[in-house]
Image (cartoon, grey):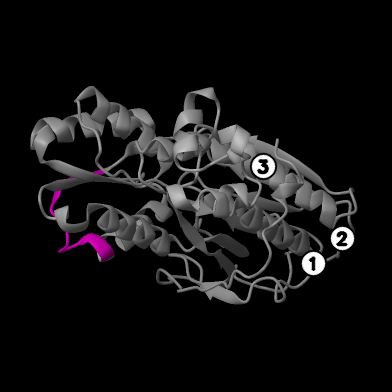
Amino acid sequence: MRRAAFAVAAGAMAVSLAACGSAKESGGGSSSSSSSSAKKGDAIKVGLLLPENQTARYEKFDRPLIEKKVKELTNGKGEVVYANAKQDASLQNQQVDTMITNKVDVLIVDAVDSAAIKNSVQKAKDAGIPVVAYDRLAQGPISAYTSFDNETVGKTQGQALLDALGSKAKSGKIVMMNGSVTDPNAAQFKKGAHEVLDGKVNIGKEYDTKDWKPENANQNMEGAISALGKKNIVGVYSANDGMAGGIITALKAAGISNIPVTGQDAELAGVQRIVTGEQYMSVYKSYPQEADIAAQMAVALAQGKSLDSIAKDKVDSPTTKQVPSVLVPVQSLTKDKIKDTVIKDGIYTVADICTAQYKAACDKIGLK
Protein backbone atom coordinates (compact mmCIF):
# COMPACT_ATOMS: atom_id res chain seq x y z
CA MET A 1 0.00 0.00 0.00
CA ARG A 2 0.90 3.60 -0.05
CA ARG A 3 3.50 5.14 2.17
CA ALA A 4 3.48 7.98 4.64
CA ALA A 5 2.39 10.15 1.76
CA PHE A 6 -1.13 9.11 2.64
CA ALA A 7 -0.94 11.90 5.15
CA VAL A 8 -3.60 14.43 4.39
CA ALA A 9 -2.41 17.20 2.13
CA ALA A 10 -2.02 20.35 4.15
CA GLY A 11 -5.01 22.31 5.02
CA ALA A 12 -5.10 25.02 2.46
CA MET A 13 -8.32 23.42 1.28
CA ALA A 14 -11.27 25.57 2.16
CA VAL A 15 -14.45 23.60 2.49
CA SER A 16 -17.56 25.00 0.86
CA LEU A 17 -21.01 23.53 0.94
CA ALA A 18 -24.50 23.88 -0.40
CA ALA A 19 -27.19 21.93 1.36
CA CYS A 20 -29.01 19.51 -0.90
CA GLY A 21 -32.40 17.90 -0.85
CA SER A 22 -35.44 18.69 1.24
CA ALA A 23 -36.36 17.17 4.53
CA LYS A 24 -39.39 15.10 5.33
CA GLU A 25 -38.41 14.31 8.88
CA SER A 26 -35.93 15.67 11.34
CA GLY A 27 -33.70 13.99 13.86
CA GLY A 28 -30.51 12.04 13.42
CA GLY A 29 -28.56 15.16 12.62
CA SER A 30 -27.27 15.78 16.12
CA SER A 31 -23.75 17.13 16.21
CA SER A 32 -23.18 16.38 19.85
CA SER A 33 -23.02 12.68 20.58
CA SER A 34 -23.95 9.13 19.86
CA SER A 35 -27.07 7.57 21.33
CA SER A 36 -24.98 5.73 23.89
CA SER A 37 -25.40 7.18 27.34
CA ALA A 38 -21.89 6.40 28.59
CA LYS A 39 -18.81 7.95 27.02
CA LYS A 40 -16.26 5.44 25.80
CA GLY A 41 -12.52 5.53 25.84
CA ASP A 42 -10.13 4.49 23.09
CA ALA A 43 -11.13 0.81 22.96
CA ILE A 44 -13.93 1.40 20.46
CA LYS A 45 -15.20 -0.76 17.63
CA VAL A 46 -15.84 1.00 14.31
CA GLY A 47 -17.88 -0.78 11.65
CA LEU A 48 -16.81 0.12 8.09
CA LEU A 49 -19.12 -0.82 5.21
CA LEU A 50 -17.92 -0.02 1.69
CA PRO A 51 -20.11 -0.51 -1.38
CA GLU A 52 -18.09 -2.42 -3.95
CA ASN A 53 -14.66 -3.63 -4.96
CA GLN A 54 -14.64 -2.99 -8.71
CA THR A 55 -13.61 0.64 -8.31
CA ALA A 56 -9.98 0.60 -7.23
CA ARG A 57 -10.29 3.34 -4.63
CA TYR A 58 -12.21 1.48 -1.94
CA GLU A 59 -9.77 -1.35 -1.20
CA LYS A 60 -6.67 0.58 -2.24
CA PHE A 61 -7.29 3.86 -0.46
CA ASP A 62 -10.44 4.29 1.62
CA ARG A 63 -10.22 1.17 3.76
CA PRO A 64 -6.54 1.36 4.76
CA LEU A 65 -6.69 5.12 5.25
CA ILE A 66 -9.67 4.89 7.60
CA GLU A 67 -8.15 1.97 9.48
CA LYS A 68 -4.89 3.87 9.93
CA LYS A 69 -6.57 7.05 11.14
CA VAL A 70 -8.82 5.23 13.62
CA LYS A 71 -5.70 3.63 15.11
CA GLU A 72 -3.99 7.01 15.35
CA LEU A 73 -6.98 8.63 17.04
CA THR A 74 -7.40 5.84 19.60
CA ASN A 75 -3.76 5.23 20.57
CA GLY A 76 -3.85 1.92 18.73
CA LYS A 77 -6.79 0.60 20.76
CA GLY A 78 -9.62 1.17 18.29
CA GLU A 79 -10.73 -1.70 16.07
CA VAL A 80 -12.19 -1.42 12.55
CA VAL A 81 -14.54 -4.23 11.55
CA TYR A 82 -14.79 -4.26 7.75
CA ALA A 83 -17.21 -5.60 5.14
CA ASN A 84 -17.66 -4.91 1.41
CA ALA A 85 -21.11 -5.23 -0.17
CA LYS A 86 -19.84 -5.97 -3.70
CA GLN A 87 -22.53 -3.72 -5.18
CA ASP A 88 -25.35 -5.67 -3.49
CA ALA A 89 -27.74 -3.48 -1.48
CA SER A 90 -29.41 -6.47 0.19
CA LEU A 91 -26.04 -7.82 1.28
CA GLN A 92 -25.13 -4.44 2.72
CA ASN A 93 -28.33 -4.40 4.77
CA GLN A 94 -27.39 -7.82 6.13
CA GLN A 95 -23.93 -6.48 6.94
CA VAL A 96 -25.49 -3.69 8.99
CA ASP A 97 -27.46 -6.30 10.93
CA THR A 98 -24.23 -8.20 11.59
CA MET A 99 -22.51 -5.04 12.79
CA ILE A 100 -25.38 -4.38 15.17
CA THR A 101 -25.17 -7.95 16.48
CA ASN A 102 -21.42 -7.49 16.96
CA LYS A 103 -22.15 -4.33 18.97
CA VAL A 104 -19.97 -1.90 17.09
CA ASP A 105 -19.89 1.56 18.65
CA VAL A 106 -20.30 3.48 15.39
CA LEU A 107 -20.79 2.74 11.69
CA ILE A 108 -19.18 4.34 8.65
CA VAL A 109 -21.38 3.45 5.67
CA ASP A 110 -20.83 4.13 1.98
CA ALA A 111 -24.23 3.02 0.72
CA VAL A 112 -24.71 0.86 -2.35
CA ASP A 113 -28.22 2.31 -2.60
CA SER A 114 -28.87 5.44 -0.57
CA ALA A 115 -32.61 4.76 -0.24
CA ALA A 116 -32.39 1.00 0.35
CA ILE A 117 -30.10 1.53 3.34
CA LYS A 118 -32.64 3.74 5.15
CA ASN A 119 -34.25 1.05 7.35
CA SER A 120 -30.87 -0.35 8.31
CA VAL A 121 -29.67 3.09 9.38
CA GLN A 122 -32.79 3.34 11.54
CA LYS A 123 -32.04 -0.08 13.07
CA ALA A 124 -28.54 1.10 13.95
CA LYS A 125 -29.86 4.27 15.56
CA ASP A 126 -32.41 2.26 17.54
CA ALA A 127 -29.53 0.11 18.80
CA GLY A 128 -27.64 3.21 19.93
CA ILE A 129 -25.15 3.10 17.06
CA PRO A 130 -24.55 6.41 15.24
CA VAL A 131 -23.96 6.25 11.48
CA VAL A 132 -21.51 8.34 9.46
CA ALA A 133 -22.58 8.50 5.82
CA TYR A 134 -19.38 8.26 3.81
CA ASP A 135 -19.03 9.52 0.24
CA ARG A 136 -22.77 9.06 -0.46
CA LEU A 137 -25.58 10.75 1.43
CA ALA A 138 -27.46 7.76 2.83
CA GLN A 139 -31.08 8.15 3.86
CA GLY A 140 -32.29 7.51 7.40
CA PRO A 141 -31.23 9.16 10.68
CA ILE A 142 -27.52 9.52 9.95
CA SER A 143 -25.41 11.42 12.47
CA ALA A 144 -22.75 12.85 10.13
CA TYR A 145 -21.73 12.99 6.48
CA THR A 146 -18.54 13.59 4.53
CA SER A 147 -18.02 13.53 0.81
CA PHE A 148 -16.85 15.73 -2.02
CA ASP A 149 -18.73 18.63 -3.55
CA ASN A 150 -20.46 16.44 -6.10
CA GLU A 151 -22.08 19.11 -8.26
CA THR A 152 -18.67 20.76 -8.50
CA VAL A 153 -17.28 17.41 -9.70
CA GLY A 154 -19.80 17.40 -12.56
CA LYS A 155 -19.11 21.04 -13.37
CA THR A 156 -15.37 20.36 -13.39
CA GLN A 157 -15.85 17.46 -15.80
CA GLY A 158 -18.20 19.43 -18.03
CA GLN A 159 -15.89 22.44 -18.20
CA ALA A 160 -12.90 20.25 -19.00
CA LEU A 161 -14.83 18.66 -21.86
CA LEU A 162 -15.77 22.11 -23.20
CA ASP A 163 -12.16 23.25 -22.93
CA ALA A 164 -10.98 20.18 -24.83
CA LEU A 165 -13.58 20.59 -27.58
CA GLY A 166 -12.97 24.31 -28.05
CA SER A 167 -14.44 25.55 -31.32
CA LYS A 168 -15.59 22.01 -32.16
CA ALA A 169 -18.08 21.92 -29.28
CA LYS A 170 -21.11 22.01 -31.59
CA SER A 171 -19.55 20.40 -34.64
CA GLY A 172 -20.99 17.00 -33.75
CA LYS A 173 -22.57 15.07 -30.89
CA ILE A 174 -21.34 14.20 -27.42
CA VAL A 175 -22.34 11.13 -25.45
CA MET A 176 -23.08 11.43 -21.73
CA MET A 177 -22.34 8.36 -19.62
CA ASN A 178 -23.69 9.05 -16.14
CA GLY A 179 -23.42 6.81 -13.10
CA SER A 180 -25.91 4.54 -11.39
CA VAL A 181 -29.40 5.79 -10.53
CA THR A 182 -29.06 4.16 -7.08
CA ASP A 183 -26.18 6.51 -6.20
CA PRO A 184 -27.25 10.04 -5.17
CA ASN A 185 -23.79 11.30 -6.10
CA ALA A 186 -24.40 10.29 -9.72
CA ALA A 187 -27.42 12.57 -9.90
CA GLN A 188 -25.35 15.45 -8.54
CA PHE A 189 -22.50 14.78 -10.98
CA LYS A 190 -25.04 14.78 -13.80
CA LYS A 191 -26.68 17.98 -12.62
CA GLY A 192 -23.37 19.79 -12.39
CA ALA A 193 -22.27 18.60 -15.83
CA HIS A 194 -25.54 19.65 -17.43
CA GLU A 195 -25.29 23.11 -15.88
CA VAL A 196 -22.04 23.60 -17.79
CA LEU A 197 -22.77 21.68 -21.00
CA ASP A 198 -26.41 22.43 -21.80
CA GLY A 199 -26.71 24.79 -24.74
CA LYS A 200 -23.00 24.60 -25.51
CA VAL A 201 -22.86 21.08 -26.94
CA ASN A 202 -25.21 18.76 -28.80
CA ILE A 203 -26.00 15.75 -26.60
CA GLY A 204 -26.59 12.85 -28.96
CA LYS A 205 -27.10 10.07 -26.41
CA GLU A 206 -27.25 9.97 -22.63
CA TYR A 207 -27.19 6.95 -20.33
CA ASP A 208 -27.52 6.17 -16.64
CA THR A 209 -25.09 3.29 -16.28
CA LYS A 210 -26.24 0.35 -14.19
CA ASP A 211 -24.01 -0.23 -11.16
CA TRP A 212 -21.29 2.02 -12.59
CA LYS A 213 -19.89 -1.06 -14.34
CA PRO A 214 -17.33 -0.54 -17.12
CA GLU A 215 -18.86 -3.37 -19.14
CA ASN A 216 -22.25 -1.65 -19.06
CA ALA A 217 -20.65 1.62 -20.14
CA ASN A 218 -18.94 -0.29 -22.93
CA GLN A 219 -22.26 -1.68 -24.17
CA ASN A 220 -23.91 1.72 -23.93
CA MET A 221 -21.10 3.30 -25.90
CA GLU A 222 -21.37 0.65 -28.60
CA GLY A 223 -25.07 1.48 -28.85
CA ALA A 224 -24.34 5.21 -29.07
CA ILE A 225 -21.78 4.67 -31.85
CA SER A 226 -24.29 2.56 -33.77
CA ALA A 227 -27.06 5.13 -33.33
CA LEU A 228 -25.07 8.30 -33.98
CA GLY A 229 -22.42 7.13 -36.40
CA LYS A 230 -18.76 7.14 -35.50
CA LYS A 231 -17.95 10.25 -37.54
CA ASN A 232 -20.49 12.32 -35.63
CA ILE A 233 -19.18 11.81 -32.08
CA VAL A 234 -16.82 14.55 -30.90
CA GLY A 235 -16.52 13.81 -27.20
CA VAL A 236 -17.74 11.72 -24.26
CA TYR A 237 -18.71 12.79 -20.78
CA SER A 238 -17.87 9.83 -18.53
CA ALA A 239 -18.73 10.17 -14.85
CA ASN A 240 -15.77 8.08 -13.66
CA ASP A 241 -12.55 6.43 -14.74
CA GLY A 242 -13.81 2.86 -14.63
CA MET A 243 -16.54 3.63 -17.14
CA ALA A 244 -14.09 5.70 -19.19
CA GLY A 245 -12.05 2.53 -19.64
CA GLY A 246 -15.07 0.67 -21.04
CA ILE A 247 -15.97 3.63 -23.24
CA ILE A 248 -12.47 3.94 -24.68
CA THR A 249 -12.41 0.22 -25.48
CA ALA A 250 -15.61 0.68 -27.50
CA LEU A 251 -14.23 3.78 -29.23
CA LYS A 252 -11.04 1.95 -30.20
CA ALA A 253 -12.99 -1.01 -31.54
CA ALA A 254 -14.96 1.38 -33.77
CA GLY A 255 -11.80 3.09 -34.98
CA ILE A 256 -12.52 6.34 -33.13
CA SER A 257 -9.56 8.15 -31.61
CA ASN A 258 -8.48 11.62 -30.55
CA ILE A 259 -11.76 12.64 -28.95
CA PRO A 260 -11.85 13.85 -25.33
CA VAL A 261 -13.22 11.52 -22.67
CA THR A 262 -13.66 12.66 -19.06
CA GLY A 263 -13.37 10.65 -15.86
CA GLN A 264 -13.22 10.79 -12.08
CA ASP A 265 -11.34 9.16 -9.19
CA ALA A 266 -7.78 9.41 -10.57
CA GLU A 267 -7.51 5.62 -10.78
CA LEU A 268 -4.06 4.46 -11.85
CA ALA A 269 -5.37 3.10 -15.16
CA GLY A 270 -7.16 6.40 -15.74
CA VAL A 271 -4.02 8.43 -15.03
CA GLN A 272 -2.07 6.20 -17.42
CA ARG A 273 -4.70 6.74 -20.13
CA ILE A 274 -4.36 10.50 -19.55
CA VAL A 275 -0.59 10.16 -20.04
CA THR A 276 -1.15 8.46 -23.41
CA GLY A 277 -3.92 10.85 -24.47
CA GLU A 278 -6.63 8.19 -24.66
CA GLN A 279 -8.49 9.89 -21.79
CA TYR A 280 -8.51 13.66 -21.51
CA MET A 281 -9.00 14.18 -17.77
CA SER A 282 -10.05 12.81 -14.44
CA VAL A 283 -11.22 14.47 -11.25
CA TYR A 284 -8.77 14.09 -8.40
CA LYS A 285 -10.43 13.77 -5.02
CA SER A 286 -8.29 13.71 -1.91
CA TYR A 287 -9.21 10.33 -0.42
CA PRO A 288 -6.73 10.91 2.43
CA GLN A 289 -8.65 14.01 3.50
CA GLU A 290 -12.09 12.41 3.14
CA ALA A 291 -11.01 9.29 5.03
CA ASP A 292 -9.37 11.39 7.73
CA ILE A 293 -12.58 13.34 8.31
CA ALA A 294 -14.74 10.20 8.38
CA ALA A 295 -12.47 8.60 10.97
CA GLN A 296 -12.51 11.75 13.09
CA MET A 297 -16.32 11.84 12.96
CA ALA A 298 -16.66 8.15 13.78
CA VAL A 299 -14.28 8.22 16.74
CA ALA A 300 -15.89 11.36 18.17
CA LEU A 301 -19.39 9.88 17.88
CA ALA A 302 -18.30 6.57 19.39
CA GLN A 303 -16.76 8.42 22.32
CA GLY A 304 -19.81 10.62 22.81
CA LYS A 305 -18.01 13.80 21.81
CA SER A 306 -19.22 16.82 19.87
CA LEU A 307 -18.66 17.13 16.13
CA ASP A 308 -18.64 20.91 16.31
CA SER A 309 -14.89 21.21 15.81
CA ILE A 310 -14.94 18.81 12.84
CA ALA A 311 -18.12 19.58 10.90
CA LYS A 312 -18.80 23.28 10.44
CA ASP A 313 -21.61 22.86 7.92
CA LYS A 314 -24.94 21.06 7.56
CA VAL A 315 -26.76 19.30 4.74
CA ASP A 316 -30.29 17.96 4.39
CA SER A 317 -30.93 14.48 3.02
CA PRO A 318 -34.37 13.44 1.71
CA THR A 319 -35.11 12.13 5.24
CA THR A 320 -32.94 14.01 7.71
CA LYS A 321 -32.38 17.71 8.33
CA GLN A 322 -29.21 19.50 9.32
CA VAL A 323 -26.71 16.65 9.22
CA PRO A 324 -23.24 17.79 10.40
CA SER A 325 -21.15 17.63 7.25
CA VAL A 326 -17.82 18.28 5.58
CA LEU A 327 -17.45 18.48 1.80
CA VAL A 328 -13.92 18.19 0.44
CA PRO A 329 -12.82 20.23 -2.63
CA VAL A 330 -11.79 18.56 -5.91
CA GLN A 331 -9.27 19.25 -8.69
CA SER A 332 -9.24 18.72 -12.44
CA LEU A 333 -6.47 16.30 -13.41
CA THR A 334 -5.08 16.63 -16.94
CA LYS A 335 -1.63 15.77 -18.27
CA ASP A 336 -0.11 18.95 -16.90
CA LYS A 337 -1.58 18.42 -13.42
CA ILE A 338 -0.33 14.90 -12.65
CA LYS A 339 2.73 16.07 -10.71
CA ASP A 340 0.75 18.57 -8.65
CA THR A 341 -2.00 16.16 -7.65
CA VAL A 342 -1.55 12.41 -7.35
CA ILE A 343 2.25 12.48 -7.22
CA LYS A 344 2.49 15.45 -4.87
CA ASP A 345 -0.01 13.87 -2.46
CA GLY A 346 1.75 10.50 -2.59
CA ILE A 347 -1.13 8.61 -4.15
CA TYR A 348 1.20 7.28 -6.86
CA THR A 349 4.89 7.57 -7.67
CA VAL A 350 6.24 8.27 -11.14
CA ALA A 351 7.35 4.62 -11.18
CA ASP A 352 3.78 3.49 -10.50
CA ILE A 353 2.48 5.45 -13.48
CA CYS A 354 5.39 5.21 -15.89
CA THR A 355 5.79 1.47 -16.25
CA ALA A 356 7.53 0.12 -19.37
CA GLN A 357 4.32 0.35 -21.39
CA TYR A 358 3.89 4.05 -20.58
CA LYS A 359 7.51 5.21 -20.33
CA ALA A 360 7.68 6.77 -23.78
CA ALA A 361 4.43 8.65 -23.23
CA CYS A 362 5.63 9.79 -19.80
CA ASP A 363 8.91 11.03 -21.28
CA LYS A 364 6.97 12.97 -23.91
CA ILE A 365 5.09 14.98 -21.28
CA GLY A 366 8.09 15.37 -18.99
CA LEU A 367 6.89 12.95 -16.32
CA LYS A 368 10.15 11.51 -15.01
User: Which of the two labelled residues, at mark 3 and mark 2, occupies the earlier sequence position?
Assistant: 2
- Vertical placement of 128 versus 334: above or below? below
* Residue 104 seen anywhere in this rendered image of the structure: no
The CA span between labels 1 and 3 is 23 Å
Q: For mark 2, does the 10 Å Cα neighbourhood hold few (<14), some (14 to 19), or many (20 or more) residues?
A: some
Residue found at x 30% / y 57%: 158
Q: Which residue is mark 3?
A: 63
Q: Position of residue 317 (x, y in %)?
A: 47, 65
Q: Are marks 1 and 3 in contact (CB under 8 Å)?
A: no
Residue found at x 60% / y 33%: 352
Q: For mark 3, does the 10 Å Cα neighbourhood hold few (<14), some (14 to 19), or many (20 or more) residues?
A: some
Residue found at x 78% / y 51%: 70
Picture quarter with the N terminus: top right
The CA span between labels 3 and 2 is 23 Å
Q: Which residue is mark 2?
A: 40
User: Which of the two labelled residues, at mark 1 and mark 3, occupies the earlier sequence position?
Assistant: 3
Q: Are marks 1 and 2 in contact (CB under 8 Å)?
A: yes
| Label 3: which secondary element | helix
User: Which of the two labelled residues, at mark 1 and mark 2, occupies the earlier sequence position?
Assistant: 2
Picture quarter with the C terminus: top right
The amino acid beneath tag 1 is Gly
Q: Which residue is mark 1?
A: 304
Q: Is residue 12 magenta?
A: no
